[in-house]
Amino acid sequence: MTKINTSLHSSRRKSRKAHFQAPSSVRRVIMSAPLSKELREKHNVRSIPIRKDDEITIVRGTNKGRTGKVISVYRLKYVIHVERVVREKSNGQPVPLGIHPSKVQIVKLKGDKDRDNLLERISKGRAEKAERSKA
């Protein structure tokens, strides 16, 4: 079997190194979250990089089913913090729980000019690919 993408390594060691030493721009793409069924139908996009102020639902773990707004995207640790999803420290102080973006579902997007362009670009490419496969 030949390699499909020559710029990526199939070696576990090198893949892990690339993941944990990735720059912030690459981490943004790795930290993508799937869209809800309604948003997927509307935008014709499956997942999108998560950002602050997106509204999400947690779909895995002990906090499954909880919804809230993203209060921070912690790229260094590959986690997001959601409002009201906290844990009490021994002294009673609340600490936000880190959740991986792949374990959440975006329910409402925080739209801006760049994000709208991104969604439009992706759906346009999907539409062109569908037309080519029909022909």
Image: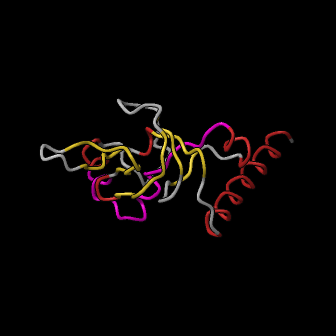
Q: Residue at x 30, y 59 (%)?
A: 76
Q: Residue at x 42, y 65 (%)?
A: 25
Toward the right, the furthest residue is 135
Quadrant in which the C terminus appears: top right
| Residue 121, position as x, y percentages in the image | 69, 60
Q: Is residue 86 above or below residue 70?
A: above
Nearer-the-camera pick, 29 or 13:
29
**Residue drawn at (18%, 46%), measured in percent from left and top?**
92
Q: What is the residue that sits farthest to the bottom in this orientation?
A: 113
Say which residue appears at 30% left-offset and 43% top-offset: 11
Q: How is the image coloured?
A: secondary structure
* 18 left or right of 71 in image: left
Res 100 quadrant in image: top left
* Residue 13 position in % (x across, y down): 24, 45
Residue 81 located left or right of residue 39: left
Q: Is 129 left, or right, of 110 in this rendering?
A: right
In percent of width and height, residue 131 lies at 83, 45
Image coordinates for residue 8, horizontal then vertical, percent: 40, 51
Q: How many marks?
A: 0
Residue 35 part of the magenta segment: yes
Range drawn in magenta: 17-37
Task: Answer with the quarter of the image where residue 134 lies.
Answer: top right
Q: Nearer the viewer, residue 57 or 7?
A: 57
Q: Is residue 27 magenta?
A: yes
